[in-house]
Image (spheres, grey):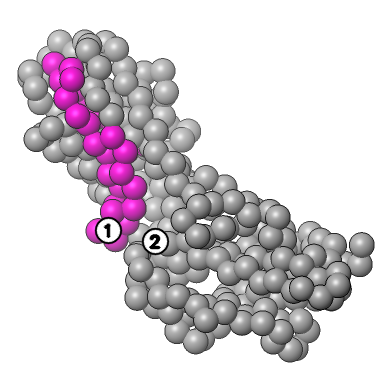
Amino acid sequence: MVRGCVWLLLALLACQPEGSLGPMQVCSTGAFDSQAVRCTTDEAGTPIQSGEVFCTVEVRNQAGRNATGRFFYLDEEVSVSRTVVEAGASAVAFRFARVGLQALPGGAWRCEITVDDDVASVDFESAASAGPLLDLAACPGSETVGGGGVPICTRDLSSEGWPRTDQLTCSASVAGAKGCHVSTELHLGNQTVARSDGVDAAAQLVAYAKGFSNGASGGFAAGDYRCVFLLDGQAAGERAFTLREP
């Protein structure tokens, strides 16, 4: 899940030219001062290991103008947020967060802030794994969240297992594999008990999930299962879990 937030700081800058954008910075959560709306350390030159990043830019005499913040992964837009600059604001910041998920996928990122016709941007790198499959998870269907037809697991419960149920979900993030076919098989022991038709990854960073259901009395049988994730028909990752008797 992705959420965008905006901060405005009400303080005047004495040295910035009227109507221009000042220096731009990017940082992870630990280096962001929400009160000052500033990065205490500009991390643009250092690979960032975080599931949440901020980019900030200084503004002056921009009251009433439209500000837009965009984040790009592998040159493709993955998030956009908008606000209106308030009177006296000296800085604007935008946030990109993969709520409940792992760090930003490794590779090239860019943040761009536009205030009407003025544009500032900064490139940065993520130090995390580049995928192509990240955030692998298995959970009961009751432990999912998300709109847009992609109900991902709120957290990976594969190591814990859970009582028998009639709804199972296998979910993941697909990074840097635009155009690849993503599908899932559900294995019980050495047998494939269900499989999905799959979908083609429509963007460089997408959420993927497959829900499996069993209408038999008691739902899926107790036993050791695996969610096997496939890219273009080849196994690329899995999550093993156990369903217990109630």
Residue drawn at x 43%, y 79% is 181
Most common secondary structure along the magenta stretch: strand
Residue drawn at x 57%, y 58% is 152
Residue type at mark 1 is Glu
Residue 242 in view: no
User: Which residue is tagged 1?
Assistant: 76
- The crowding category of the residue bearing disc 2, from other C-alpha atoms within 10 Å (few below 14, some 14 to 19, many at least 20), is many
Magenta region, residue range:
53-82
Residue 192 in view: yes
Residue type at mark 2 is Leu
Q: Earlier in the sequence, mark 1 or mark 2?
A: 1
The disc label shown at residue 162, or none: none
- The crowding category of the residue bearing disc 1, from other C-alpha atoms within 10 Å (few below 14, some 14 to 19, many at least 20), is few
> In this orientation, which residue lies closer to the viewer: 125 or 96?
96
Q: Are marks 1 and 2 in contact (CB under 8 Å)?
A: yes
Q: What SS does tag 1 mark?
A: strand
User: Which residue is tagged 2?
Assistant: 205
Residue drawn at x 78%, y 84% is 189
Residue drawn at x 40%, y 75% is 200
Q: Where residue 30 sits in the image (x, y, percent)?
A: 48, 33
Residue 227 quadrant: bottom right
